[in-house]
């Protein structure tokens, strides 16, 4: 993973600070531990492998190398109402990123999955921490199957990757850069 390339994305805040791990329990768990610090605004935490990746409703998110497992920490300058539907907006950013880069049109399965050929290729986990009506922080977790070809039996019927479906390598860096560029236009920072 070329972290310096990702830092060169056309953003002002998101992705200018990146922490990269070969292996971590969960990028989301770690992000929650440091998110209260205002200096972490825009930080992206990326891992090759997560041993306790999180999905929605307490489900596990399986993460192997050659995919995207990342969490973004944000301190939005907006009110809570302005974040209504944020997970769908994030899904739309991911969908647009893949369409822009590769001409592939993913489907959004509301509220937080992206689908290709009737199988899940990406999931989003958002957490908003508030103090009353004031937003303390927003954490955006994105798991995306990019270049993985072999899936464990228990998820092989429901999960796929871009490479498995389209028989070519995809640039994780380009995908991350495009996603964060689109996200920064959606959220007031």
Image (cartoon, rainbow, N blue to C red):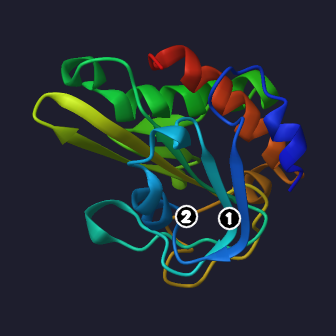
- Near-viewer residue (173 or 62): 173
**Residue at label 2?**
159
Whether 72 is drawn above or below 98: the answer is below
* Image point (61%, 21%), residue name: 182
Query: In the image, is 32 to the left or to the right of 40?
Result: left
Packing grade of label 2 (10 A; few <14, some 14-19, many >=20) is some
Q: Quadrant of residue 78?
A: top left
The numbered mark, 2 or 1, whose residue comes first in the sequence reads: 1
Query: In the image, is 162 to the left or to the right of 84?
Result: right
Q: Quadrant of residue 72?
A: top right
Q: Quadrant of residue 153?
A: bottom right
**Residue at label 1?**
47
* Image point (20%, 28%), residue name: 134
Whether 150 is drawn above or below 148: the answer is below
- Near-viewer residue (151 or 55): 55
Whether 150 is drawn above or below 39: the answer is below
> Is residue 14 among the parts visible in the rendering?
yes
User: Where is residue 157 shown, x and y percent of the image?
Assistant: 52, 71
User: Where is residue 111 shown, x and y percent of the image?
Assistant: 32, 40
Which of the two discs, 2 and 1, sits closer to the camera? Answer: 1
């Amino acid at each position: 993973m070329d972290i310096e390339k990702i830092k060169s994305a056309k953003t002002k805040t998101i992705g200018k600070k990146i922490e990269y791990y070969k292996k971590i329990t969960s990028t989301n768990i770690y992000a929650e531990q440091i998110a209260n610090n205002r200096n972490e605004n825009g930080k992206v935490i990326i891992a090759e492998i997560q041993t306790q990746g999180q999905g929605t409703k307490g489900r596990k998110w399986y993460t192997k190398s050659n995919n995207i497992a990342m969490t973004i920490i944000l301190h939005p300058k907006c009110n809570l109402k302005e974040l209504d539907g944020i997970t769908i907006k994030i899904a739309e950013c991911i969908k647009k990123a893949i369409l822009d880069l590769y001409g592939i049109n993913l489907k959004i399965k509301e509220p937080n999955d992206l689908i290709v050929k009737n199988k899940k290729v990406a999931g989003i986990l958002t957490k908003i921490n508030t103090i009353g009506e004031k937003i303390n922080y927003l954490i955006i977790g994105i798991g995306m199957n990019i270049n993985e070809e072999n899936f464990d039996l228990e998820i092989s019927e429901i999960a796929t990757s871009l490479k498995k479906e389209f028989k070519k390598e995809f640039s994780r860096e380009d995908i991350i850069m495009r996603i964060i560029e689109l996200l920064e236009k959606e959220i007031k920072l």
